[in-house]
Image (cartoon, rainbow, N blue to C red):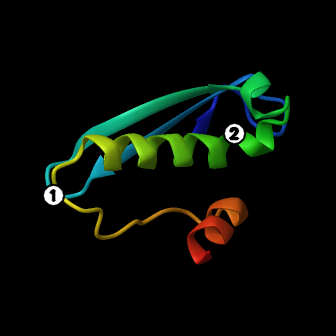
């Protein structure tokens, strides 16, 4: 995920997933902070969730492995 500005006051965030075998960007989600209850800290989880849902919905192959940074909300989501 990448925000349009550092810190906790970003308006937009772009979240992308990449296939490590082909080095291609698969889905790309752009999140507005208003979609995340005006909290930029929630944008990464929302972007991740949308990107993975989009990938699973369109893919012919199962999702085998996810490698991400140590974002707390995503760690929590994946542990469930």
Secondary element at image label 2:
helix
User: Against 13, is 53 above or below?
Assistant: below
Coordinates of residue 25 in the picture (x, y in percent): 29, 39
Q: Quarter of the image for the N terminus: give it.
A: top right
Residue, far bottom: 79
Left or right? Give the position of 28 relative to 50.
left
> Which mark, residue 3?
none
**Structural crowding at the residue carrying mark 2, measured as other residues with C-alpha within 10 Å and reported as few (<14), some (14–19) or many (≥20):** many
Upstream in sequence: badge 2 or badge 1: 1
User: Against 27, is 34 above or below?
Assistant: above
Coordinates of residue 74 in the picture (x, y in percent): 62, 61
Which picture quadrant has residue 28?
A: top left
- In front: 22, or 33? 33
Q: Residue at x 24, y 62 (%)?
A: 62
> Which mark, residue 21?
1
Q: Residue at x 73, y 27 (%)?
A: 35
Left or right? Give the position of 67 relative to 57.
right
Coordinates of residue 15 in the picture (x, y in percent): 51, 38
Q: Residue at x 28, y 69 (%)?
A: 64
> Which mark, residue 43?
2
Left or right? Give the position of 35 relative to 70.
right
- Mark 2 touching mark 1, by CB under 8 A? no
Q: How many marks can you see?
A: 2
Coordinates of residue 67 in the picture (x, y in percent): 42, 66
Mark 2 to mark 1 CA distance (whole Å):
27 Å
Q: Residue at x 84, y 30 (%)?
A: 9
């Amino acid at each position: 995920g990448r925000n349009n500005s550092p810190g906790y006051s970003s308006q937009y965030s772009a979240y992308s997933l990449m296939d490590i075998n082909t080095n291609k960007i698969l889905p790309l989600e752009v999140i507005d902070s208003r979609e995340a209850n005006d909290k930029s800290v929630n944008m990464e989880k929302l972007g991740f969730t949308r990107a993975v849902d989009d990938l699973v919905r369109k893919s012919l192959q199962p999702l085998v492995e996810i490698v991400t940074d140590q974002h707390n909300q995503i760690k929590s989501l994946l542990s469930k």
